[in-house]
Image (spheres, helix red, strand yellow):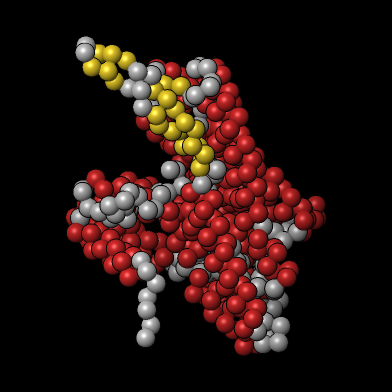
């Protein structure tokens, strides 16, 4: 008779208890319902086409570019590009605008001052990012309209009535779609669960999963000699191993011990206890690959939508499975890992905060030496985290060259999916614990931690 492994049934019952507790809490139930409703609106909008185009022709063009830029961009837009949807530009213009504002915050003194003014300054910077999103969406929308018109050939007519009217209508439609997605993401962040922008990208990637599984099964039937059950088993085992590796690395941290000094208040003694400062291996989360992808998508998009000979050569050189693209992609990921970590975590501020609390790292002088020590440890962790992210993100190239996998497997999409899932689980955990529900934590402490500790 089959005997379940020890701890398996209690674990299943605990998971079912978590789900029940989620729906017992009215606030959490409302937030989850709102998030799902907004995602349903997003997925519905994916199938609303830009006026004046033939979606069947566009679908054929994207399918012919399997493994190319169009296929890659369509994945991040949740299939909106293939459908020539009003959301064809996706949320990438907003991400690009956020990148620019992050860079300008370090360079422009006025923006740097705003970033230090707390919530008010952050809202002002977000407002500038919105304006930048509209500008970038206009530019990308124009190039998109020009490229759509260039696809009209003798054998196919993608744009029914090309001309100035079509260009203006397409630019306004695509810009409006991007602005609506930006608003949708902000509403999810404020009134739902998780980071709205990340959730939208997450939903777009997950939406491609059924088709990816179908293509994989179809591949085993069409080419059983080269893609048989053994290859499928290796891919499945590799997928499990990569997911487990990503989870371990996302939750990995270096705990720097912190000792609090004893102090006497009246007749009682306080302090003297030890704690730790958690420094994550991947402090930047999924931001570096998203930033790097959006930066590389922009020049590729311009190059692919014009007939300029030099830009066409650039487009061919920056093909996402080429060595130049991989080199630049890895370089951008490493840069943004260090850059975003430096923005999010200031060792000097942390050292000053510890000093004000009469706390110190054992063996390290408070103040400047503590800041230098924290910066040294954080730099080494970021080095490991940057190359871990790079390795995961270039995984698809290896799989496609060795196994001829028929869909975009792993890489940035896997990192985003796992990272967003961990963050969302952490937020649900926080809501449950706040309302005294056991949730994911259980009696022995938290079992699930987000990427931010």
Q: Residue at x 67, y 87 (%)?
A: 224
**Quarter of the image that includes the C terminus:** top left
- The answer to whether residue 144 is above or below residue 252 is below
Residue closer to the observer: 271 or 64: 271
- The answer to whether residue 181 is above or below residue 75 is above
Choose top left, top right, bottom left or bottom right for residue 382. Answer: top right
Q: Position of residue 267 (x, y in %)?
A: 21, 13
Q: Residue at x 50, y 70 (%)?
A: 209
Q: Is residue 440 left or right of residue 291?
A: left
Residue closer to the observer: 275 or 401: 275
Q: Position of residue 431 (x, y in %)?
A: 27, 49
Q: Residue at x 40, y 61 (%)?
A: 42
Residue closer to the observer: 409 or 422: 422
- The answer to whether residue 425 is above or below residue 152 is above
Q: Is residue 31 visible?
A: no
Q: Is residue 447 visible?
A: yes
Residue closer to the observer: 331 or 362: 362
């Amino acid at each position: 008779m089959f005997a379940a492994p020890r701890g398996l049934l209690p674990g299943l019952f605990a998971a079912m208890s978590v789900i029940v507790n989620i729906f017992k809490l009215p606030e959490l139930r409302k937030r989850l319902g709102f998030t799902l409703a907004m995602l349903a609106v997003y997925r519905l909008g994916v199938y609303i086409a830009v006026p004046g185009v033939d979606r069947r022709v566009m679908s054929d063009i994207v399918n012919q570019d399997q493994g190319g830029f169009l296929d890659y961009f369509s994945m991040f837009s949740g299939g909106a590009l293939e459908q020539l949807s009003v959301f064809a530009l996706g949320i990438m213009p907003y991400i690009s605008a956020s990148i620019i504002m992050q860079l300008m915050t370090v360079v422009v003194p006025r923006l740097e001052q705003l970033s230090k003014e707390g919530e008010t300054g952050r809202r002002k910077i977000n407002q500038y990012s919105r304006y930048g999103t509209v500008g970038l969406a206009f530019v990308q929308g124009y190039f998109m309209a020009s490229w759509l018109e260039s696809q009209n050939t003798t054998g196919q007519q993608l744009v029914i009535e090309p001309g100035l009217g079509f260009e203006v209508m397409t630019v306004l439609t695509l810009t409006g779609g991007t602005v609506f997605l930006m608003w949708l993401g902000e509403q999810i962040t404020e009134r739902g669960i998780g980071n709205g922008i990340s959730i939208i990208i997450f939903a777009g990637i997950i939406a491609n999963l059924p088709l990816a599984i179908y293509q994989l099964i179809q591949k085993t039937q069409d080419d059983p000699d080269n893609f048989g059950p053994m290859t499928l088993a290796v891919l499945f085992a590799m997928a499990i191993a990569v997911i487990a590796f990503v989870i371990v690395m996302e939750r990995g941290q270096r705990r720097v011990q912190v000792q609090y000094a004893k102090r006497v208040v009246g007749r009682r003694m306080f302090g003297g206890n030890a704690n730790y400062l958690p420094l994550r291996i991947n402090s930047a989360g999924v931001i570096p690959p998203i930033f790097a992808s959006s930066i590389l998508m922009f020049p590729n998009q311009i190059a692919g939508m014009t007939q300029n000979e030099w830009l066409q050569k650039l487009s061919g050189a920056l093909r996402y499975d080429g060595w130049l693209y991989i080199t630049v992609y890895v370089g951008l990921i490493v840069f943004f890992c260090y850059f975003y970590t430096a923005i999010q975590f200031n060792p000097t501020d942390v050292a000053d905060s510890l000093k004000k609390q009469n706390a110190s790292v054992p063996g390290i002088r408070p103040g400047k030496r503590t800041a230098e020590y924290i910066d040294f440890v954080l730099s080494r962790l970021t080095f490991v985290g940057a190359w871990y992210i790079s390795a995961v993100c270039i995984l698809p190239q290896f799989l496609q060259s060795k196994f001829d996998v028929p869909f975009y497997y792993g890489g940035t999409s896997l990192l985003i999916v796992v990272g967003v899932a961990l963050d969302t689980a952490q937020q649900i955990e926080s809501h449950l614990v706040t309302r005294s529900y056991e949730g994911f934590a259980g009696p022995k402490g938290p079992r699930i931690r987000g990427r931010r500790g």
